[in-house]
Amino acid sequence: MKKNKKRTRKSFLLIRAIIRLIDKKIVTPITKFILLITDKLGRRTDRFERWLVKKNTLVFISLIIAIATFFGIDKRTTSLVDSYAEVLYNQKVEAIYNTEKYVVEGLPETVDVTLIGRKIDMYLAKQSSNGIVTVDISNLKEGTHKVNLNYEGAINSIDYKLDPSVVNINIYAKASSTKIATIDTINKEMLNTKLSISNILIDKTEIIIKGAEHTISKVANVRALVDISKLVDPEVGVMTLENVPIIAYDKDGKVVNVEMVPSKVTATINIDSPHKEVPIKVIPIGEVQFGKAISSMTSSETKVTVYGEDAILSKIEYLPVEIDVTNLDNNKTFNVPLQVPEGLREISIKNTKITVSLGQEETKEINNVMIETTNLDSNYKAAAIGASSIKTTVIIKGTKEVLDAIDESKIKAIVDLSGYKEGDHEAVVTVTGDDAKAKYTPKTTKIRIRISKK
């Protein structure tokens, strides 16, 4: 009984709300319009009122309002009833067959589906996630077949057209083979320049590749692509990278689409930071003002830590820093940026200040310096032609303090025989010493030398 009373009350409230709405939206505007007309007509209002209250007039006005209302509602209804077409792009195709026994080629991964129907139905169809494109080939054997794709829509009142709707496929027996995975490291440049990858291991090296016989025969190698950029906050130690993809390649380096078991592996990456501390060696370039020589070269930074591979670090004895002293006639301080030597990754110091001091130039001669050969092909031997080609006198220029401190045993006269072949040749003599503040010049600038096979 109480429920019936509640329903009656709700119905009453609803009807009252509808009446108020009609009064507000229809009756009141019409009344205002009529009052406006009567005000304009003035004395002729009596005639207008008599016309307005006639039965035919009221019927005529009601008919106009009804027709207007009909067309307004019909327009909205038509927009929901008229047929429309819309395309759903890249709908995934699901094939039904024995995936352990067969391989299917020619089946598209996705198709486009065109929806045709009422606008309201199409809206519901797009909102639904139940529509799928399927093809049942479970009853087909090896060979070439033409098959129909089907779209199982969620709304029955919608027509569906597929592009493509029919495809030619090839069914092959599935074969398998085993390959040993190698490791490819990518994006190494993303690693901090002070860090280095010393070793990488993967938890699975034997990879089973599956596919049609003619496809897996194309596979030349499989690689685990270890992407260094995916390491989170890499640091010295052992880090683990999961879900490393395994990719199959042919002999030309192109990707081969085959099934792989496993398709992803876990990599264990050893990270270290090989480095070495070496002195900074200042090397002057050019000649200072005539009559002067370099008495000292001091650097605000005397040592620097260099980072790189162990094989390269073992060959680094110092960090060379060149400064141009051409026509220098007074003491001077240079602000010099330090460059990372070729083959290394990083240095600990980026800049240094080098102060060059000058003094009066003096000369010293070192006699009987043996002339050595270097860089000769191992299949040949060299011999000097004449006594003047065996030894030379070296002229050294520098300040008195520099000349007095020179170690004569460190002075070398050298002939570079790179690229020389069998026969008699004239070769250039160069001289080096361990003190870069001095200048070294051989009295014998060229020698005769004979090269023969061993």
Image (tube, rainbow, N blue to C red):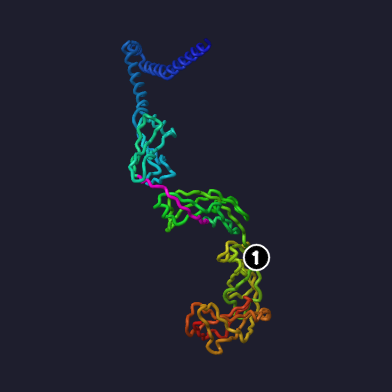
Residue hosting label 1: 277
Residue 323 seen in this snapshot: yes
x and y percent of residue 237 in the render? 63, 55
Give amino acid for label 1: Glu
Instruction: Out of 157 and 440, give the one closest to the viewer.
Output: 157
Residue in the foreground of this view, choosing between 135 and 236: 135
The residue carrying pointer 1 sits among few (fewer than 14), some (14 to 19) or many (20 or more) residues within 10 Å by Cα, namely: some
Residue 321 against residue 121 in the figure, above or below: below
In the image, farthest residue toward the bottom: 387
In magenta segment, residue 15: no
Q: Residue at x 40, y 51 (%)?
A: 213
The kind of secondary structure element at disc 1 is strand
Q: Is residue 214 above or below residue 398?
A: above
The number of numbered badges drawn on the structure is 1
Image spot of residue 413 (x, y percent): 58, 81
Using residue 318 as the reference point, say whether residue 259 is left or right of it. Answer: left
The quadrant where residue 415 appears? bottom right
Q: Which residues are magenta?
A: 169-185
**Can you give x and y, in whole percent of width and height, for residue 430 in the image?**
56, 80
Residue 47 falls in which quadrant of the image?
top left
Residue 174 within the magenta-colored segment of the rendering: yes
Q: Residue at x 37, y 23 (%)?
A: 73
The overriding secondary structure of the stretch rendered in magenta is strand
Residue 91 visible, this orientation: no
Above or below for 36 versus 129: above
Q: 204 or 254: nearer the eye?
A: 204
Q: Position of residue 251 (x, y in %)?
A: 43, 58
